[in-house]
Image (cartoon, grey):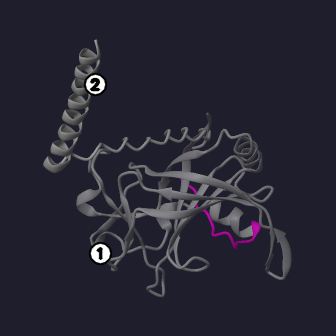
Amino acid sequence: MGSMTPASTTPASTTPASATPSFLQRAAAKDMAKDAGPGEAGGLVQAPGRRFVLEATGLEARAGFSLRDGALSNDSRIAAHARLPLDTLGRDGLLDTAGELPLAIRPLPEGGAAGRILLVLAHGGQEPDFHATLWLPPEVFAVLTRDLHAGRAGRLTVSATTSLWLDAAERDAPASRAVAWKLGRDDERGTAPARGLVERIEWSAAPPAPAPIAPPAPEDPEETVAEAVGRLNWSLKQIVLVLIFLMIIAALK
């Protein structure tokens, strides 16, 4: 099983997949407490002491290129299906929530947020619904890709400190209790992405698929009364024939 815990635990910002390297460097230096959001006046607060956990399965390596800012760039990534094992993710002021979402795992550009693993959670944009992007240092991305091709990375777990929001009543909830994370709003009152610093990432081979259960053998249908009587009559006829045959033999003697 592969795992990594970054040496630094200072929260850092991240950026969507379409961002340029320079923006990544600037975003990584921001303090998440300065992110736009509803604030305590709106009944929502940030909870830096509580970890946001994602579990991903179905990891699949994808290669390609895309046009960004007028230039062709490498779009290699690992696609996966992620789920929140306990909590839910929603948007401030809206009722839609999600417990599952697509995850894209990408390598950070050279020199961008070195030594850090960054997480972005968003809604809309290139994806119609909730989605997540995990940015890995190139050396970590290379190890994960190698393990994926070798069959040693079938599932992945991420634990991060994020700029997501919680209801004030949930801020001090125990870790065993489910909470409803929310994306905040931007300056135009739209949904703003949340950024996070991954404190731990680990992966392992997917568990073997359970052996298929053989269907039970069909039971013999219950014998009807008519069938039982018919079988008895046939047996009696056989006995009578045997007795007649014995009587003929005795008469010949």
On the image, the x and y values in percent for residue 204 come to 59, 38
The kind of secondary structure element at disc 2 is: helix
Compared to residue 177, the image places residue 217 above or below, namely above
On the image, the x and y values in percent for residue 155 come to 57, 46
Compared to residue 142, the image places residue 92 above or below, namely below
Taking the spot 45% from the left edge, 62% from the top edge, the residue there is 100
Q: In the rendered view of the protein, which quadrant contains the C terminus?
A: top left
Query: Which three-letter amino acid code belongs to the residue tagged 2?
Result: Phe
Residue 10 in view, yes or no: no
On the image, the x and y values in percent for residue 239 come to 22, 28
Position of 126 compared to 124: left or right? right
Question: How far is the residue under mark 1 from the one under mark 2?
Answer: 104 Å
Label 1 crowding class (10 Å Cα cut-off): few <14, some 14-19, many 20+? few
Decide: marks 1, 2 in contact (CB < 8 A)? no
Taking the spot 33% from the left edge, 79% from the top edge, the residue there is 93
Position of 88 compared to 223: left or right? right
Front-most of 194 and 245?
Answer: 245
Q: Of discs 1 and 2, which sits in the foreground?
A: 2
Q: Residue 69 is drawn in which quadrant?
A: bottom right
Does the stretch in magenta take in 19?
yes
Position of 38 compared to 126: left or right? left
Q: Which residues are magenta?
A: 9-21
Label 1: which residue? Answer: 42
On the image, the x and y values in percent for residue 182 come to 38, 68
Label 2: which residue? Answer: 245
Taking the spot 70% from the left edge, 69% from the top edge, the residue there is 23
Residue that protrudes farthest toward the front in the picture: 252
